[in-house]
């Protein structure tokens, strides 16, 4: 898979994961710190996606991405690994903003890969289990 395609896929996964309910976010992103992983994945892959697509993303898409970032900036994170943070109104706002961004990007639904353990405490997305990363 080409680098740009991989980055786009990871960006879409990260955005879609932010739009999920708390229970589905936990199911998708376990093991690990759910809130930190969701945020860090989106911030990383949205930046890389914008860099790779420089000049090719329309104003609405860029605004949608920035709206999600602004929502993330409003989160009041307390303790890593405290999934109760995902119940807060600020998280619900991020979910709603992410859903709107998905609509702008034309994404209705997608299947997210499961994480699988490939070694002692080493986890990867199922998509990448058999690749040389």
Image: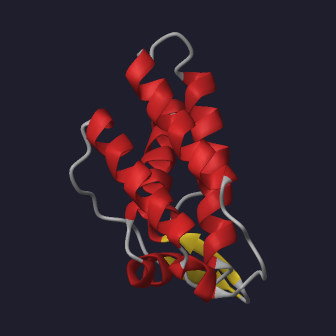
Quick check: 59 above or below 36? above
Position of 110 compared to 17: left or right?
left
Residue 133 image offset from top left, x and y in percent: 65, 56
Q: Residue at x 42, y 51 (%)?
A: 98
80 or 54, nearer to the observer: 80
Q: Quadrant of residue 119?
A: bottom right
Q: Is residue 41 visible?
A: yes
- Taking the view exactly as shown, the residue that stands out farthest to the right is 79
**What residue lies at 59% left-to-right and 71% top-to-bottom?**
124
| Image spot of residue 17 (x, y percent) | 44, 63
Q: Is residue 133 visible?
A: no
**Residue drawn at x 68%, y 79% as measured from the top left:** 33
Where 71 falls versus 58 (above or below)? below
> What colouring method underlies this structural image?
secondary structure
Q: Residue at x 66, y 62 (%)?
A: 75
Relative horizontal placement of residue 105, taking residue 70 as reference (left or right): left
Number of disc labels = 0
Q: Residue furthest front?
A: 89
Q: Closer to the camera, 132 or 82?
A: 82
User: Relative to 57, is 7 above or below?
Assistant: below
Front one among 41 and 114: 41
Q: Give the residue furthest to the left.
A: 108
Residue 52 screen position, x and y as percent: 58, 24
């Amino acid at each position: 898979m080409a680098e740009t395609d991989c980055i786009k896929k990871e960006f879409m996964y990260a955005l879609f994961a932010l739009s999920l309910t708390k229970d589905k976010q936990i199911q998708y992103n376990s093991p690990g710190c759910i809130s930190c992983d969701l945020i860090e994945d989106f911030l990383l892959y949205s930046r890389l996606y914008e860099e790779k697509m420089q000049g090719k993303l329309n104003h609405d898409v860029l605004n949608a991405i920035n709206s999600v970032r602004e929502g993330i900036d409003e989160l009041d994170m307390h303790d890593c690994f405290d999934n109760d943070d995902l119940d807060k109104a600020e998280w619900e706002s991020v979910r709603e903003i992410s859903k709107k961004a998905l609509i702008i990007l034309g994404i209705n639904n997608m299947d997210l890969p499961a994480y699988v353990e490939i070694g002692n405490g080493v986890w990867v997305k199922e998509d990448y289990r058999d690749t040389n990363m």
